[in-house]
Image (tube, helix red, strand yellow):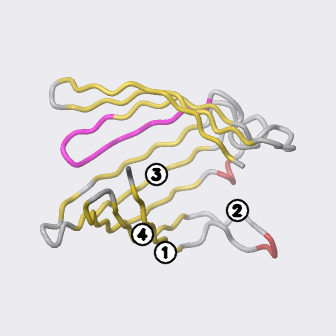
Amino acid sequence: MEVDFYGGYKFTASDVGFDVGVLRYQYFNNDLNPSANTTEGYVAGTFGPATLKYSHAFTNLFGFANSKNSYYLDLSAAFDTGYWGLTVTPHVGYQKVKNNGAASYTDWSVTLGKDFGSGLSGTLAYVDTDTNSYRGAGNKNLGRWGVVAGVKYAF
């Protein structure tokens, strides 16, 4: 089970929105050595439709040995299509796993979103990476492309 703890502060200065904070990814009954538990700090800036975010690992990153000071750089934007309340969100990111070059990767996605009102929204995304280093059961490539559908209700 993963539980995420986070805290931060958002503010605006000269038409740029800023967000700074700390995240803790806690995995209970984690038996990895080194631990998969990870603490990161982040800073993000938003101008117009675009957001640039930098996250920095203060601990080893998700069980990678000697990976303290790894980072993730994320650029995304949100565009209203002008049709039926649909938004398009392109994204590109780069994960640098310190001292584990083969585990570093670039990822990208394009998401189509729709707000249905009354707290209900849905998304459909194409996601992909340039890695084949992450393998699961049966040697399955966990970094291959995929399509992800989501439904969310906020209350």
Q: CA distance from mark 4 to mark 3?
A: 15 Å
Would you say the magenta stretch is mainly helix, strand or loop?
strand
Dot 4, crowdedness within 10 Å: few (<14), some or many (≥20)? Answer: some
Residue 53 x/y as whole percent: 40, 39
Query: To which residue does mark 1 refer?
Result: 147
Mark 2 or mark 1, earlier in chain: 2
Q: CA distance from mark 4 to mark 1?
A: 6 Å
Label 1 vs label 3, nearer the camera = 1
Label 2 vs label 1, nearer the camera = 1
Query: At label 3, which amino acid type do we have?
Result: Gly
Q: Which residues are magenta?
A: 45-57
Query: At label 2, which amino acid type do we have?
Result: Ser
87 shown above or below 98: below
Query: To which residue does mark 2 refer?
Result: 133
Checking the image for residue 125, the label placed there is 4
Query: To which residue does mark 3 refer?
Result: 93
Do the CB atoms of the residues marked 4 and 1 lie less than 8 Å apart?
yes
Query: At label 4, which amino acid type do we have?
Result: Ala
